[in-house]
Amino acid sequence: TLSVDDDARVELLGFVVGRDKGSLTLTLTEEHVRGASWGRTTVYGLLSDSAALDLRALVSIRPAANGSDGLFEGRAMLLSRQARACIVPSLEIEARDVQATHRTAVGPIDPEQAFYCETRGCTLEEARTLLTHGFFEQLLCRLPNTSQRDMVRAEWQALLP
């Protein structure tokens, strides 16, 4: 649970890499308690083999949190036909004059993007690697400093299939 109050600004970024028969069940709550707070919860998952992700996320804005702005974003890229992801976002709004939203996307590598890379001289495997790295770089670029980005990049690249 991420609690945000008194005009605070909080951003939570999560990276999930699943492979083999790994399975992760994750429940997240972004709770705006009071004041005009701002919160962003973002989770990106990359799943291969028969890995599975079950992610439930709630953006909750309590009655005293008028003027708050909350967002949950969950994305999962499936690198095999056996990989699975279920991302279920919810909103619970008890205040007026707020912004609250969610967005999710789950799917394999876009075949059109892979084809585009291939027309530029990449093999299919190189295209998959390029698109996989680009997927996570979208989130990595939101980390505040270079050393954090480099540390997280090294961690997830070591886990890639």
Image: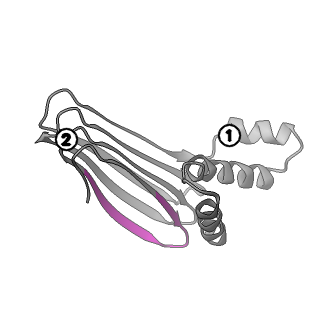
**2 and 113: which is toward the camera:** 2
Q: Is residue 8 left or right of residue 62?
A: right
Crowding at mark 1 (Cα within 10 Å: few <14, some 14-19, many 20+): few
Please give the name of the residue rendered at 78% of the width and 36% of the height, measured from the top-left corner: 116
> Magenta residues?
14-30
| Residue 53 highlighted magenta (yes or no) | no
Residue 137 - label? none
Q: Which residue is mark 1?
A: 111
Cβ–Cβ under 8 Å for marks 1 and 2: no
**75 and 39: which is toward the camera:** 39
Q: Which residue is mark 2?
A: 35
Please give the name of the residue rendered at 54% of the width and 48% of the height, measured from the top-left corner: 142
- Inspect the image, locate mark 1, and give the three-letter code of the amino acid beneath it: Pro
Sequence-wise first label, 1 or 2: 2
Crowding at mark 2 (Cα within 10 Å: few <14, some 14-19, many 20+): some
Q: Is residue 81 left or right of residue 25?
A: right
Could you tell me residue 66's position as x and y percent?
17, 34
